[in-house]
């Protein structure tokens, strides 16, 4: 039950991070959601073992296409984010 609740919190944070990045770069965050892709254990910078989750999402730079992005969460924090290359307007 704790893993489920922790996963929901991490997913909500990933959605906020994806939406925020899209706003920052003037992109459209499509479907207003992220999709779970992977989960494993990893160590943080202090050596503590935490759950590392990867979520994928889609965004658009023109409104007529779909590009892919990924958010890596380590525990409850955003550890990394990748955006597929897109045209800058």
Image: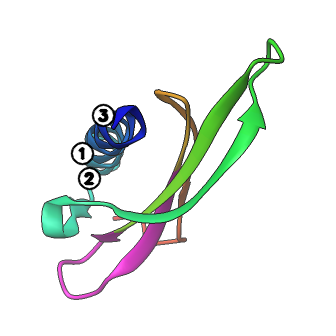
Asked if labels 2 and 1 touch by Cβ distance under 8 angstroms, the answer is yes
Q: Position of residue 14 (x, y in %)?
A: 36, 43
Residue located 71% across and 42% down the image: 41
Residue 33 lies, with reference to residue 46, above or below; the image says: below
Q: Residues within 10 Å of mark 3 (few under 14, many from 20)?
A: some
Determine which of the numbered discs, if any, sits on residue 64 in the image: none
Under circle 1, the secondary element is helix
Residue with the mark numbered 3: 9
Under circle 2, the secondary element is loop
Find the distance from the CA under tag 3 to the CA under tag 1. 21 Å
Q: Residues within 10 Å of mark 2 (few under 14, many from 20)?
A: some
Residue 49 lies, with reference to residue 21, above or below; the image says: above
Residue sitting at the far bottom? 64
Residue located 50% across and 60% down the image: 70
2 or 3: tag closer to the N-terminus:
3
| Closer mark to the observer between disc 2 and disc 3 | 3
Residue with the mark numbered 2: 26
Residue 8 lies in quadrant: top left
Residue sitting at the far front? 1
Q: Position of residue 61 (x, y in %)?
A: 30, 71
In magenta, the rendered stretch is: 58-71
């Amino acid at each position: 039950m704790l893993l489920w609740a922790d996963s929901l919190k991490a997913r909500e944070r990933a959605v906020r991070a994806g939406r925020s990045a899209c706003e920052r770069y003037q992109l459209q965050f499509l479907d207003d959601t992220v999709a779970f892709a992977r989960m494993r254990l990893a160590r943080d910078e202090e050596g503590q073992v935490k759950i590392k989750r990867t979520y994928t999402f889609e965004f658009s730079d023109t409104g007529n296409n779909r590009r892919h992005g990924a958010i890596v969460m380590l525990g409850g924090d955003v550890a990394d984010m990748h955006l597929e290359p897109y045209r800058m307007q």
